[in-house]
Amino acid sequence: MWSTNEAALLNRTIDALERVLRYMQGAVSAINLDGVFCVRRVAEQLQAFLKFEPQVFQGIRFQLEHLLAMARQCADEAMLFVQQEYTVYSLAVGFLMTNGTKLLWYPSQNIPRSMIEKPISCKDYNFNLTINDLCLSELGGPRYRNSNPCDLSDECLKEKTKPNQRGYELTHQVLYWEMLEIWGCQDHIPKSLRDKLCANVLRDAEFTEKTNFPEHEHDLFMEQIGLCGFWGYKDFHKQKWLEKVLEWQKPTGCYTGDVEYMCVDEMPIEDHIRVKREEKTLTDGCLSHKTGVAMLALVVNIRFEAEKEYFLKNS
């Protein structure tokens, strides 16, 4: 039997994900591409859970199948609205809203903390969303135009392997390599690269905890949990962190708050660098990207909570 407290936390997380999906279904005509992308990745993760570890999720299989159906329907419907409203943008990176060619799955593992690097200073931090989208568009290939899929430029490969990164620049390095896997450009990303990137993401997430989870970090923090959770790093599964993600959810199911990320150096404190991030405000102040990355954090925590209970029961 699962312990009462752990089962309750797992059920709360499942319930939270269902409420987010219900909110997104109600806002299906207003979600931006980032939001649809997140819903689609949630669907793929749920599918991966049931395919690769059916024994772990047997007790909650019907709940996960229900969430999977919700996520697929929401992503399919919302994608059509985005394609109509943002035609040019969709031609470049709209394929990211569709199903990938493979499911992303790695066994649960821990990060070697020896891989953690000292981050660049905030004055050198420069996350360029245009460059990021350009690099992702290289994965699209013939889905929308006559070009080769996975025709990756040296510039993008260099950009996405730069050492000592932080913030959104770092999480979007993780995102890039995960998309290479999902779209079949590479079978598996080398463990050394995965370890290094998510070791640095963990460094950033732990600094957010150390500074008492300031609101301007919430969006990034949930993105960190979700993306490195996709690679199976259970270091991002901490009860305190999960409780925060659950606490930040509004009764409607969505997530609101500050949309401006602020880069802060640990020691010494330098000038704080504020960075505007692409966001779309939905009804009641709800944020499309923030609500989307919250779903990523919730779905990987469902995995880790279920695995923890399964392996405790069978140890």
Image (cartoon, rainbow, N blue to C red):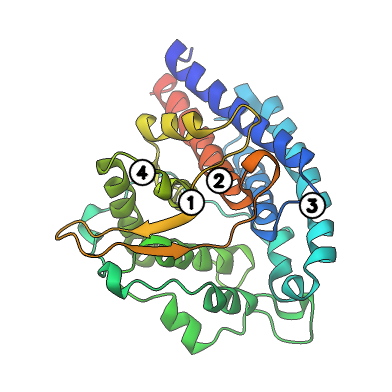
Mark 2: few/some/many CA within 10 Å (<14, 14-19, 20+): many
| Element marked by disc 2 | helix
User: Which is nearer the eye, 266 or 14?
Assistant: 266
Q: How far apart are marks 2 and 4 (CA)?
A: 20 Å
Q: Who is closer to the viewer here, 293 or 108?
A: 293
Location of mark 1 (residue): 223
Q: Residues within 10 Å of mark 3 (few under 14, many from 20)?
A: many
- N-term mark: 4 or 3: 3
Q: Do the residues labelled 3 and 2 touch (CB within 8 Å)?
A: no
238 relative position to 47: left or right: left
> Alpha carbon of mark 1 to alpha carbon of mark 4: how far?
15 Å
Measuring 43% from the left and 29% from the top, which residue is drawn there?
243
- Locate residue 217 relative to residue 13 in the image: left or right: left
Counting from the top left corner in percent of width and height, residue 264 is at 28, 58
The residue at which mark 3 appears reads as 78
Q: In this view, does 94 lie above or below 289?
A: below
> Residue, x 45% and y 24% (percent of image)?
309
Label 2 amino acid? Answer: Leu
Which mark sits nearer the N-terminus, 2 or 1? Answer: 1
Label 2: which residue?
Answer: 296
Eyeballing the image, is 298 above or below 100? above
Q: What residue type is labelled 3?
A: Ala
Do the residues under discs 2 and 1 have CB atoms within 8 angstroms? yes
